[in-house]
Image (tube, rainbow, N blue to C red):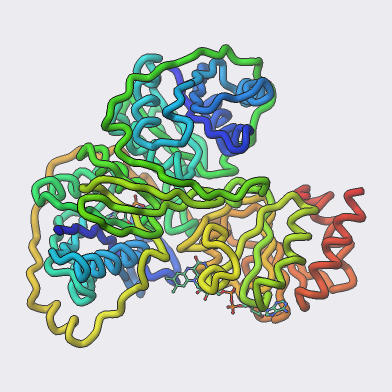
Amino acid sequence: MKILVCITHVPDTTSKISFTDNNTKFDKNGVQFIIGPYDDYALARAVELKEQHGGTVTALNVGEAETEPTLRKALAIGADDAIRINVFPSDAFFVASQIAKVAKEGNYDLIMMGRESIDFNGGIVHSLVGEMLALPSVSPVMSLDIEGSTARMTREIEGGKEFLEVPLPLVAGCQEPIAEWKIPNMRGIMASRTKPLEVIEPEKVEEGTTVKTFELPPPKGEVKLFEEDKIGELVDELINKAKVI
Amino acid sequence: MSVLVFVEVDEKEIKKSSLEAISYGKALEDDVLAICFDKVDHGAVESIGKAGAKKLIQVTNEQLAVPNIMAYSSAIAEAFDQNGCSVLVLAKSSLGDPVSARVAIKVGASVVSNVSGLSEGSGEFVVDRSIYTGKALAKTIVKGDKKVITIKKNTVPVREDGAAPEVVDFQPTLSDGDFVVKVTKTEKTTGEVLLPEADIVVSGGRGMGGPEKWGILEDLAKVLGAATGCSKPVSDMNWRPHHEHVGQTGIKVSPSLYIAVGISGAIQHLAGVNSSKYILVINKDPEAPFFKAADFGIVGDAFDIVPKLTEAIKAKKD
Ligand SMILES: Cc1cc2nc3c(=O)[nH]c(=O)nc-3n(C[C@H](O)[C@H](O)[C@H](O)COP(=O)(O)OP(=O)(O)OC[C@H]3O[C@@H](n4cnc5c(N)ncnc54)[C@H](O)[C@@H]3O)c2cc1C
Ligand SMILES: Nc1ncnc2c1ncn2[C@@H]1O[C@H](COP(=O)(O)O)[C@@H](O)[C@H]1O
């Protein structure tokens, strides 16, 4: 089985976000980058599926040279090889077009992604790739098992879940508890240094959107504390001032 | 130019987020059409009209009774083209997200997701998009003549001034390819407020001590008509179902009021709640980081305070 796992290179979940150049650029100063947490679930499950069924796992990122340590980490976790499409990932449609081309040429049985990136939060790249390749796409996937040429999955929906059967090939946007995050071991880290990492140049594609400027939300005011015997006053405030209950 | 809005139904009612999507559409263009895959009753049709839709396109196909992303996308794309629409608006959801992307490719539209503000400016079509899990927003130019926009909850207030819409039946052209994803079973809680839709959320963390202690939170949620949520460790330990887990790796909520009980306020949890209008924190540790992100707070033991709060609300509401 050939599996493609698409990973993002994103600020660590505890990062403070700020911008430079008149709020037109993300400020990378002091920020640690990681594999997107959802992509990490996808990668972990991909490695497990490979262990069960044989085959290969290819990690793919659309990004500039700075993302290579993140791809190396995916190799250390268990991907066999990696591809970097050498371009800034500016827009969901643009990224999906790049991924779709590689996915098509590589004839993968399974294309795994995270349910969403934690920088763009679009939650749509998997569905875009699915439609571009006329393949089914399912997200957010909480469990995924392969039997022959069929995938059995559970998908989270509001207030519950769906149980699905889908023929391969397909695109899956993953989330927990599909697998436990894998921490690279020493052997993996050593091996990752020599595993192939191919850099390819992007397709010419017109973006659907461009960011004009970034903004930070206004800072939160001071919290208003109520003593335990003043709960009535709090309730008054919620009813009459905030008007939320 | 017309705007098409995909409308979702939950337990026979039009989802509030879909009514918000209609009102969003109405703010863009006068001519708003809604499309819906459930047979809805008179009251539901009326609410669609009030929110701003002139026409309801009703798909009554037995095969589509269970939500089907690929078939819904084909049907919506067909309706979009047939009615000469320029914009599709959807509410962000487990159905709205994938449908938005698929329709965008089918009709050749630009797609933008997680929109938290209306379009502004003349000439360019610029929307506010929530990024970095609510820690920032991007003023985003959406290019091209056709656009697909997925909006976050609480982006616009629901209008209530529209007239009853015309209802038309629509039979989309579907192919076998639209039915390759087989839903073999659906498990869904009924009779409860859906967390992503809720106007008030009552959430519990590890500080609650165990699943058997959730009664006081459920009582509070009940008097408020609120949904219940939880922190990640709580769902990891199976104290509560996964679909209640709020945060960076869980559900992102944007209610009018988020009540956090026994949750420390780790940055990954805050990422899921930072677009709430008001936050009330109840925690026995005055140093809990959540207080920094809160509007209102009570320092104390949840098991003393929550029942008192519930009683106080009951008393004032009667
Ligand atoms: C990549 C990543 C992603 C993550 N994603 C998420 C996410 O999506 N959502 C999420 O929630 N977490 C997430 N986490 C975990 C997060 O970092 C915290 O560990 C978690 O939020 C802590 O949960 P908690 O506040 O319930 O528990 P704790 O941190 O243990 O806090 C319990 C709180 O309860 C208070 N307390 C105890 N007893 C009482 C009492 N009787 N009355 C009142 N208060 C009491 C304590 O003072 C304390 O503040 C993520 C972590 C990582 C690394
Ligand atoms: N630049 C990228 N390179 C590789 N994969 C990506 C990239 N951007 C998004 N993806 C994949 O698409 C998923 C959904 O992203 P998004 O639609 O941005 O929320 C992510 O979890 C990744 O698996």
- Looking at the figure, which quarter contains the N terminus of chain B? top left
Is A242 left, or right, of A124 in this rendering?
Answer: right
Is B257 left, or right, of B30 in this rendering?
Answer: right
Instruction: Check the image and report above or below for A133 versus B223.
Output: above
Residue A233 at least partly seen: yes
Is B259 left, or right, of A15 in this rendering?
Answer: right
Q: Nearer the viewer, residue A108 or B128?
A: A108
Residue B283 horizontal/vertical position (percent): 71, 75
Residue drawn at x 13%, y 41% is: A204
Name the quadrant containing residue B221: bottom right
Instruction: Check the image and report above or below for B193 versus B283.
Output: above
Task: Find ligand 2 in the image and state its quadrant.
Answer: bottom left
Q: Residue furthest bottom?
A: A186
Q: How many marks?
A: 0
Name the quadrant containing residue B77: top left
Residue B110 at least partly seen: no
Q: Nearer the viewer, residue A139 or A35?
A: A139
Residue B129 horizontal/vertical position (percent): 44, 46
Q: Nearer the viewer, residue B219 or A28?
A: B219
Residue drawn at x 25%, y 45% is: A167
Name the quadrant containing residue B269: bottom right
Is B41 left, or right, of B5 in this rendering?
Answer: right
Instruction: Check the image and report above or below for A116 versus B191.
Output: below
Residue drawn at x 22%, y 37% is: A134
Residue drawn at x 52%, y 41% is: B117
Residue A32 horizontal/vertical position (percent): 34, 74
Instruction: Check the image and report above or below for A27 versus B125.
Output: below
Residue A22 horizontal/vertical position (percent): 38, 54
